[in-house]
Image (cartoon, helix red, strand yellow):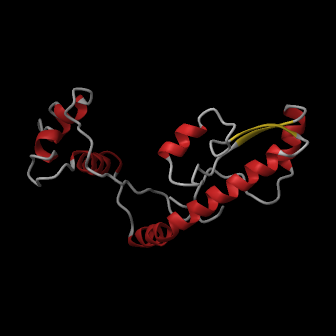
């Protein structure tokens, strides 16, 4: 989710070849569905004529096993969040880059790890695979002095909440 509703969104481009020998869960008979083979029934040559094997399996088994069904209000909240997700992530990425540069120059920081920095060992790969100037919204850094000063730093952070919601409406 994005901090307002429990749940998530699955984006499936339908391009994965689940019939490559590595995913028997899609190609072997499913006992829970009377021997249905998801690849045969919902792959590119299946009843819909497009590859929806993954999303169909995710939907029907999730509904059967844990009863996931989004409420109308939850769906409304997700749509609101999805409409601004790309903008929020661009801002998260630019803020993270600025923070990485700031931390690199700070006297109390011993190291910074962020793929957007030229010194990062995987920077060239990140440039190749990520969108321009979007290297993610998570970085790590070391506080000079180790655990004690690091704990003191975390306990005194005022700007951001200690949450697991990256890219949500609260960060």
120 horizontally vs 41: left or right: right
**Residue 109's image quarter?**
top right
Pinpoint residue 33: horizontal percent, then vertical percent. Answer: 16, 41
| Residue nearest the observer in this picture, 143 or 110 | 110
Whether residue 168 is visible, yes or no, is no
Percent position (x, y) of residue 69?
35, 60
Can you give x and y, in whole percent of width and height, for residue 113 in the image?
A: 70, 38
Q: How many marks?
A: 0
Q: Residue at x 14, y 47 (%)?
A: 44
Residue toward you, 43 or 109 = 109
Q: Is residue 78 left or right of residue 18?
A: right
Relative to 140, 16 lies left or right: left
Q: Nearer the viewer, residue 138 or 53?
A: 138
Q: Is residue 80 left or right of residue 162?
A: left
Q: Farthest residue in the top direction?
A: 21
- Residue 41, compared with residue 90, is above or below; it is above
Q: Quadrant of the C terminus?
A: bottom right
Name the residue located 22 percent from the left edge and 29 percent from the top edge. Answer: 24
Q: Residue at x 32, y 48 (%)?
A: 62
Q: Is residue 96 visible?
A: yes
Relative vertical location of residue 154 with respect to residue 169 in this rendering, above or below? above
Q: Which residue does the image show at 54% across and 54% down from the upper left? A: 132
At which x and y percent is residue 35? 11, 35
Quick one: 166 or 58, which is closer to the camera?
A: 166
The answer to whether 73 is drawn above or below residue 35 in the figure is below
């Amino acid at each position: 989710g994005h901090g307002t509703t429990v749940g998530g969104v699955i984006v499936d481009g339908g391009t994965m070849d689940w019939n490559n020998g590595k995913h028997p869960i899609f190609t072997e008979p499913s006992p829970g569905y009377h021997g249905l083979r998801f690849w045969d029934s919902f792959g590119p040559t299946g009843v819909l004529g497009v590859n929806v094997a993954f999303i169909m399996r995710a939907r029907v088994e999730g509904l059967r096993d844990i009863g996931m069904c989004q409420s109308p209000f939850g769906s409304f909240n997700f749509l609101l969040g999805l409409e601004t997700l790309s903008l929020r992530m661009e801002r998260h990425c630019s803020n993270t880059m600025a923070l990485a540069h700031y931390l690199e120059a700070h006297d109390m920081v011993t190291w910074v790890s962020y793929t957007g920095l030229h010194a990062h060992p995987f920077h060239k790969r990140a440039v190749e695979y990520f969108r321009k100037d979007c290297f993610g919204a998570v970085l790590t850094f070391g506080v000079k002095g180790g655990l004690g000063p690091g704990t003191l730093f975390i306990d005194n952070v005022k700007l951001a909440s200690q949450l697991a919601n990256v890219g949500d409406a609260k960060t």
